């Protein structure tokens, strides 16, 4: 049903708790083959994108999520040239990844062509031209199929997915993580959105145990994204090089100074601090 200006959008992510946004204008609403898509304007958070009734991003706070999933692994790696983004049809992750001059190629693998099309039209400020960057290739495909069959090898894979239900569910499976490990170059890194541990705590042990067999180093870091309510959001980390998470603040700061990017959340100091987990999150890691 079309949401009218002056009514409230109520997110249906949890059975027992909701956040609501006052709608000032409905920009776009459609029932797609894969997912229901809506974009509306709100007084404080700006434009809000929802898929199947779940908030994907707001133009007010998307910078937190996109910066932390892009810049932490890119500065930790130090010389990543090839990046694969799985999901991310809004183009925000692409925008942040392409800020790094070391990145020569970025492949965006999105299952839903309609998300890319309508985000280009109705949320152009999110991709900010990244879809048209000559380093970008857009592949419309299921990420699980792409990762199983691609002959390409990447320095970084960013899984910028929906939650583990609907089309995004396969991107949280052990076989997908195994294929990601095989699609990495030596020393490669995989990061992903891993839910809000206070409310979606089972995602931490699930991800950890499904990745552990295939990577040298598996862990998590955190970021505070206002619209992913419930405290810190966990970001999953898996790499083929165990040294990255232990790099000193000076090493990260030197890399940042040599190739700075404009940010509103990420800083070299925050980089290392984001790997310090609250005790209730650490306790969810099984071993
Ligand atoms: N970037 C965002 C943010 O700020 O939180 C939100 C995530 S992005 C919109 C999630 C994307 O993952 C959606 O566009 C969805 O279509 C895509 N997706 C879900 N399952 C997928 C799959 N199996 N393969 C590729 N893309 C998938």
Image (cartoon, rainbow, N blue to C red):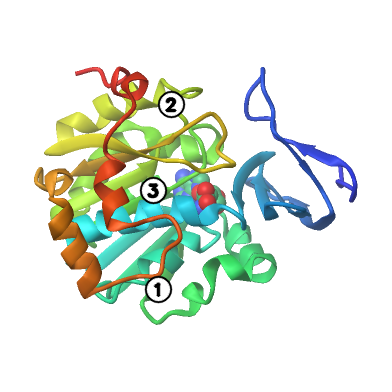
Q: Quadrant of the C terminus?
A: top left
Q: Residue at x 54, y 29 (%)?
A: 230
Q: Nearer the viewer, mark 2 or mark 3?
A: 2
Marker disc for residue 197: 2
Q: Which quadrant would residue 284 be assigned to in this image?
A: top left
Q: How much space separates mark 3 and mark 1, taking CA atoms?
A: 16 Å
Is label 3 in a helix, a strand or a loop?
strand
Toward the viewer: 31 or 70? 70
Marker disc for residue 159: 3
Q: Earlier in the sequence, mark 2 or mark 3?
A: 3
Q: Earlier in the sequence, mark 2 or mark 1?
A: 1
Q: Residue at x 35, y 68 (%)?
A: 106
Vertically, is 204 above or below 100? above
Residue 141 visible from this viewpoint: no
Query: Is residue 267 toward the left or the right of residue 163 in the image?
Result: left
Q: Quadrant of the N terminus?
A: top right
Q: How much space separates mark 2 and mark 1, taking CA atoms?
A: 33 Å
What is the tally of numbered marks visible in this picture? Answer: 3
Give percent across and percent down for residue 139: 44, 64
Provide the residue designation for mark 1.
136
Q: Residue at x 9, y 46 (%)?
A: 243
Give percent across and percent down for residue 214: 16, 36
Vertically, is 81 above or below 233? below
């Amino acid at each position: 049903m079309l949401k009218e200006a002056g009514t409230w959008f109520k997110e249906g992510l949890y059975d027992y708790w909701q956040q609501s946004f006052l709608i000032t204008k409905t920009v776009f609403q459609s029932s797609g083959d894969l997912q229901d898509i809506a974009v509306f304007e709100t007084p404080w958070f700006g434009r809000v994108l929802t898929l199947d009734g779940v908030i994907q991003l707001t133009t007010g706070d998307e910078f937190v999520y996109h910066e932390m999933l892009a810049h932490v692994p890119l500065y930790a790696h130090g010389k990543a040239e090839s990046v694969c983004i799985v999901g991310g049809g809004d183009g925000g992750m692409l925008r942040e990844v392409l800020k790094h001059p070391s990145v020569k190629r970025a492949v965006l693998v999105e299952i839903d062509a309609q998300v890319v099309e309508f985000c280009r039209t109705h949320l152009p400020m999110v991709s900010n031209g990244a879809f048209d960057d000559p380093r970008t290739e857009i592949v419309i495909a299921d990420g699980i199929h792409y990762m199983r069959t691609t002959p390409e090898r990447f320095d970084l894979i960013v899984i910028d997915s929906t939650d583990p239900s609907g089309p995004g569910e396969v991107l949280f499976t052990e076989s997908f993580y195994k294929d990601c490990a095989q699609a990495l170059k030596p020393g490669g890194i995989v990061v992903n959105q891993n839910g809000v541990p206070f409310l979606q705590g089972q995602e931490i042990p699930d991800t950890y145990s499904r990745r552990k067999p295939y990577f040298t180093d598996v862990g998590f870091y955190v970021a505070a994204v206002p619209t992913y309510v419930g405290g810190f959001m966990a970001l999953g980390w898996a790499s083929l090089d165990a040294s990255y998470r232990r790099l000193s603040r000076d090493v990260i700061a030197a890399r940042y100074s040599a190739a700075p990017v404009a940010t509103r959340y990420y800083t070299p100091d925050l980089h290392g601090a984001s790997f310090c987990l609250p005790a209730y999150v650490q306790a969810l890691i099984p071993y």
